[in-house]
Amino acid sequence: MKGLNFLNDILIWWNSKKEEISSFLVPIISIIVAFLVAAVMIKATGKSPWAAYKLLFEGAFGSSLKEFFSLKEAGEGFLKGSILTLTGLSVAVAFRVGLFNIGAEGQFIMGAIVAAYLGFKLNMTPWIDIPLILIAVIIVSGLYAAFAGWLKITRGVHEVITTIMLNWIAVHLVENWIVVGPFNIQRYRPEAILAGTPYVKEASRLKPFFQGTRLNGSIIIAILAVIFVYILMNRTVLGYEIQATGKNPDAARYSGINTARTMLIAMFISGALAGVSGACMILGTEGHYPGVFRPGYGFDGITMALIGNNAAIGTLFSSMFFGFVRAGATGMQLIGIHKTFADIIQGVATLFVAGQVGIKYLLFKIGEKKVIKEEAQSGVS
Amino acid sequence: MELAKTIVSFISSMLQFGTPIILAGLGGVMCENAGVVNIALEGIMRMGGFFAVLGAYISSTKIDPILGGKDPLAGNPWVGILFAIGIGILVGLLHAYISVSLRGNQIVSGVAINVFALGGMTFFLERYFNTTGHSPSVASFMNKPLLPHLAKLPIVGELFEAMNIFVFLALILPFVIHFYLYYTPWGLRHRSVGEHPKAADTLGINVYLVRYLAVIASGILAALAGASMSIGQLDLFDNHMPAGLGFIALAAMIFGKWTPIGTFFAALFFTLATVVQIYIQTSAPQLLNIIPRGFFLALPYILTLLVLAGFVGRATPPAADGIPYEKGEKL
């Protein structure tokens, strides 16, 4: 009966650790189920899910190891992953203080337009320009998000509603006013046929690392942001205060934490991260603020944070994963599946994370039942 | 006479443009008065809009003589409405299952539905119509007044000309739902579940059932709002739909202080900004140099923010809005 005891040990261990482990398992299960659901959808259209996923994989990583290291395809995945990491961290930091920052999209747009403007105006060296632009972006986007936090603290307005409103205010004022009006490319170069704003000066661009890839400094900025958020959350007093406020604001207040100040600072950091994400997009791949620019990375950030358990490292992994899914989905267009297919996978995975109580319940139940059974059996023998 | 005509055509375009916002906003009212937040209005509108077109297309039995395949214009738009209602019920059930039964995060669920709708409808558009732009024209309620005889009247005729089935619903339902919520026992139960589910539970009201029904009703209304865009205002589904109208509807619901009639007027007020903007664009474009177009488009959201912040009136949501309820839970 040694085998049974061994099994029993596993189950007892599982029951003692199930909370922590299931927080890892839930996102993984959600992603797997999302891929299965999407496979059924592909099958229903009469195409082969296997072939589609093979194209997805090759589109994401390249068809050989050599191609992977040339970063021709893989660079796209890392690039998209970096942008997603930044918006994901933005949502995650707000989550930790107990606020739902649905406005990452608006803060992303604010960051993007500020970067487009300063990138056009400044023309020194990259080492001065880029930090200067990022500081300006951090201030503007940070304040834009902090405004929602301020309304929450002083007026008691739910931040979900205010950030949605702020999103659309940013979208309309930037896209239907600034980009088509005072800061349109045709004001500066009347012969231009392009829509959008004038191009950022060379000195302010995040240039590709080498020929044949589009991967640029965004990934360095994203990794620095991950390290920053990790240290902030796990090693600083402010991080502790943020988490305490998020877990139980009343208890935090009674223990002497200024919860209002903590919320404001957390929202500022959150907005700043989303803004930097937008700036990376403009200074990197786009080069200017295009006429139509609604990539939705801000909304995607919500998924990234949720699947990454609102932790810095978790968000990095989920963002890189979906960065590659998004990059690879372009390859699926070969067999007539539109690249927005990535949204289906992301949407279904998020639904399962939202209903994680159900997944956890099933996981826990399996563990409990087996243990009782095993215990009863070992008692008989 | 000229003035009367202008006013009438103004009102008629307000009603037409406002219809999707009113219907979706009412969806929000139903849901949130029972204590479930629904930010999936945008996504459900998108699905409703697509499935309405799909229903109208599938119901066609005629074969196109030139292109082969179904003749898209020979279908029945009522089947489209049924399809929209069907998808509304399905998505409502899903949202209710996650937010009521599983007590999951309602906002996350809403975001997920929105994201799924974005990719999912593009996928279906490609599957059924081989395009990612817009579907072919199908049989629709576009330019089909519900009361064609009244449309021949002088001056006010234009009002009835624009009034198809969806506009009619958008005019009637706010008052029907107002009556339901404030003058019937079911409405009282509905609101009590949103204000104080524990108390409602103690009185023997099935909190879960009421919430399920409210979320499903909300799904149907939002899906109809989407259908009103695809087979009401137009006769096709465009991949950009509903272009943020779901969020305007959410804003209208708040601006209308979570009441059906308030939402109705808020939606019309928001539409006014759009109509004025279109009017200026066509008849006085030089004015747009002074007041930019983006400002008109952003106005509804700016006003909602001001209302929320308490600078213009005060808006308080139902007390238990967004809080999952667990039976036997201590307060």
Image (cartoon, rainbow, N blue to C red):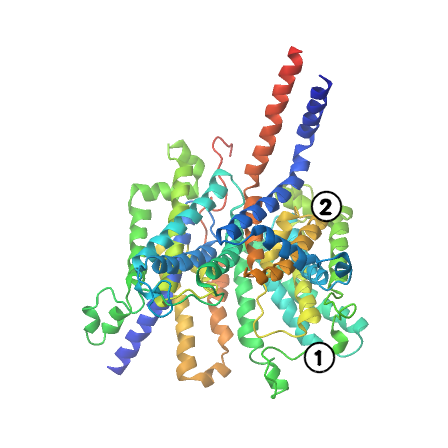
Secondary structure under tag 1 reads: helix
Residue B19, image quadrant: bottom left
Q: Tag on residue A121?
A: 1
Q: Is residue A112 visible?
A: yes
Q: Marks 1 and 2, Cα distance to the nearest angstrom?
A: 40 Å
Q: Which chain carries label 2?
A: A
Side of B111 relative to B279 (left or right):
right
**Depth order, front residue of B307/A308:** A308
Q: Tag on residue A240?
A: 2
As drawn, A150 above or below B16: above
Q: Can residue A339 be seen in this view?
A: no
Q: Which chain carries label 1?
A: A
Crowdedness near tag 2: few (<14), some (14–19) or many (≥20) residues, C-alpha within 10 Å = some
At which x and y percent is residue A298?
Answer: 60, 60
Crowdedness near tag 1: few (<14), some (14–19) or many (≥20) residues, C-alpha within 10 Å = few
Q: Tag on residue B99?
A: none
